[in-house]
């Protein structure tokens, strides 16, 4: 297996057989990007690396997948959404998974419910809202009720509609791409959306093989986590500065990182 010279070392455990045999269909090249969390600067760098890597490897049916959590915590969630929208509009094959942070962001904007808004702000949504055109002093002066009333004019409808178009899971060859994970023992076709977006220990602590090799974000690791039938690529970009993409072609697997 190869990996980018710019990438960090990744952790590998003894039960690696499913990873060693997993493949994507011939002629397909996949780049799956972990949790961006408002770091548009890192996303721009990683997309440039992907373009360079893809060009160097020659023609293929190249697909880019975002594993969700484009927003919150980092400084420029609005910019990340604009970058992602432009990428889709360019005509390239790009797909997006809905993360738990997008779920709460959209719900807070659509519902006007202050309880949902309070939770959204608690999990990093304060940074998201301040990436839109509002002065920090004005933002801090608003009550929760006033902020809820302001959201429809603050967040563009095009951004919400874009996030609402995201998928729940993507299967390509021997790999399944999800945001948070899957519930072990349940077929991929029967997974609940809540598990795909929110599950954690029930999935990450599981030690048996799974229906596919699951590529996921949501749970932060200092290094890419390869274990059994799982590959975790959320390397905490908003705080660490390391945004990770897993790259797949045939039976090969490598990584690119900022």
Image (cartoon, rainbow, N blue to C red):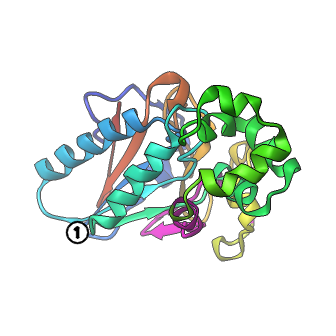
Region in magenta: 159-185
Q: Residue at x 68, y 72 (%)?
A: 187
Please indicate whether residue 193 sits to the left or right of residue 31 in the image: right
Secondary structure category for the residue under label 1: loop
Q: Residue at x 27, y 64 (%)?
A: 90
Q: Position of residue 133 (x, y in %)?
A: 53, 41
Please indicate whether residue 93 sits to the left or right of residue 77 in the image: left
Which residue appears farthest toward the top when viewing the image? 240
Taking the magenta stretch, the answer to whether it contains residue 179 is yes
Residue 109 visible: yes
Can you say whether 14 is above or below 179 in the image? above
Q: Nearer the viewer, residue 112 or 178?
A: 112
Please indicate whether residue 171 sits to the left or right of residue 180 in the image: left
Please indicate whether residue 116 sits to the left or right of residue 91 in the image: right
Q: Residue at x 80, y 58 (%)?
A: 112
Q: Residue at x 71, y 75 (%)?
A: 190
Q: Nearer the viewer, residue 67 or 246?
A: 67
Which residue appears farthest toward the right when viewing the image? 115
Quadrant in which residue 126 is drawn: top right
Can you say whether 67 is above or below 205 in the image? below
Q: Position of residue 9 (x, y in %)?
A: 40, 26
Taking the magenta stretch, the answer to whether it contains residue 169 is yes
Q: Position of residue 213 (x, y in %)?
A: 52, 57
Quadrant in which residue 146 is drawn: top right
Can you say whether 49 is above or below 248 in the image? above
Q: Which residue position holds label 1? A: 27
Q: Nearer the viewer, residue 247 or 19?
A: 247
Residue 233 visible: no
Q: Split into 4 quadrants, where in the image is the N terminus? A: top left
Q: Split into 4 quadrants, where in the image is the C terminus? A: top left
Q: Nearer the viewer, residue 241 or 233?
A: 241
């Amino acid at each position: 297996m190869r990996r980018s010279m710019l990438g960090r070392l990744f952790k590998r455990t003894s039960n690696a057989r499913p990873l060693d045999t997993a493949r994507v269909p011939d002629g397909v090249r996949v780049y799956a990007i972990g949790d961006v969390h408002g770091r548009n600067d890192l996303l721009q760098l990683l997309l440039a690396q992907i373009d360079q890597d893809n060009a160097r490897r020659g023609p293929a049916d190249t697909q880019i997948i975002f594993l969700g959590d484009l927003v919150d915590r980092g400084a420029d969630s609005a910019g990340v959404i604009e970058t992602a929208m432009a990428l889709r509009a360019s005509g390239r094959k790009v797909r997006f998974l809905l993360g738990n942070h997008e779920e709460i962001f959209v719900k807070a904007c659509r519902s006007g419910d202050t309880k949902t808004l309070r939770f959204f702000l608690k999990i990093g949504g304060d940074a998201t809202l301040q990436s839109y055109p509002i002065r920090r002093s004005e933002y801090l002066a608003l009550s929760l009720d006033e902020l809820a009333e302001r959201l429809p004019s603050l967040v563009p409808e095009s951004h919400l509609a874009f996030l609402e178009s995201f998928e729940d899971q993507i299967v390509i060859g021997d790999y399944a791409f999800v945001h948070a994970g899957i519930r072990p023992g349940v077929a991929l076709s029967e997974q609940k959306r809540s598990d795909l977006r929110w599950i954690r220990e029930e999935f990450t602590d599981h030690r048996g093989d799974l229906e596919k090799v699951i590529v996921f974000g949501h749970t932060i690791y200092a290094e890419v986590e390869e274990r059994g039938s799982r590959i975790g690529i959320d390397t905490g970009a908003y705080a660490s500065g390391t945004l990770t993409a897993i790259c797949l072609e045939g039976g090969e697997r490598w990584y690119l990182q900022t």
